[in-house]
Image (cartoon, rainbow, N blue to C red):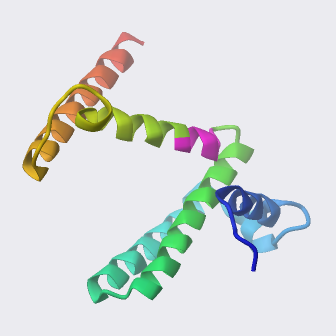
């Protein structure tokens, strides 16, 4: 089997939701996907608890596909797309790891968590000020 890329999985969700795709997948809404992403996330947790790396790999794929499918539905609803999701998570991870991507220092896991929480708090405060101005 040929190597698969993230773009291939995005295409798969789009195809399943298309007129020539799957009736069940076309019927789904963001709200109806909630139970599925919860179920798949619980299966990831079970695989981790059991130390079952083979099953973990499969379940992580299932969670990833749920995320892609929800983003596809959101795109169809003109809310956002998977590229926006990727952009946002990239920005968040970089902004919270200022000791890796910035000038801060963290030499221990404890220092890293402390800085992470501090950066997260700053982001929340900035977001609150922004929404308050609207």
**Range shown magenta:** 80-86
29 relative position to 16: left or right: left
Was residue 83 drawn as part of the magenta stretch in this picture? yes
Given residues 113 and 27, the one toward you in this image is 113
Given residues 41 and 114, the one toward you in this image is 114
57 relative position to 80: left or right: left
Count every numbered label the image shows and give the total. 0
Q: Which is the main secondary structure of the residues drawn in magenta?
A: helix
**Where residue 66 appears, x then y in whole percent?**
57, 65
**Where residue 87 appears, x then y in whole percent?**
53, 37
Instruction: Name the quadrant of the C terminus.
Output: top left
**Where residue 10 appears, x then y in whole percent?**
70, 57
Q: Residue at x 43, y 80 (%)?
A: 56
Say if 52 sits above or below 82 in the image. below
Q: Residue furthest right?
A: 20
Say if 52 sits above or below 125 in the image. below
Instruction: Name the quadrant of the N terminus.
Output: bottom right
Q: Residue at x 28, y 28 (%)?
A: 102
Q: Residue at x 45, y 86 (%)?
A: 55
**Where residue 36 appears, x then y in whole percent?**
53, 71
Was residue 63 drawn as part of the magenta stretch in this picture? no
Q: Which quadrant holds residue 64?
A: bottom right
Q: Residue at x 15, y 37 (%)?
A: 115
């Amino acid at each position: 089997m040929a190597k698969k890329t993230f773009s291939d999985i995005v295409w798969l969700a789009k195809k399943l939701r298309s007129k020539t795709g799957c009736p069940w997948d076309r019927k789904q809404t963001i709200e109806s996907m909630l139970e599925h992403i919860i179920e798949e996330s619980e299966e990831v947790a079970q695989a981790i608890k059991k130390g079952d790396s083979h099953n973990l790999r499969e379940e992580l794929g299932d969670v990833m596909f749920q995320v892609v499918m929800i983003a596809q539905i959101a795109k169809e609803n003109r809310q956002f797309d998977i590229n926006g999701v990727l952009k946002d998570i990239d920005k968040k991870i970089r902004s919270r790891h200022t000791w890796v991507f910035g000038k801060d220092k963290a030499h221990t896991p404890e220092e890293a968590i402390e800085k992470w929480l501090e950066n997260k708090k700053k982001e929340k405060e900035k977001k609150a000020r922004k929404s308050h101005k609207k």
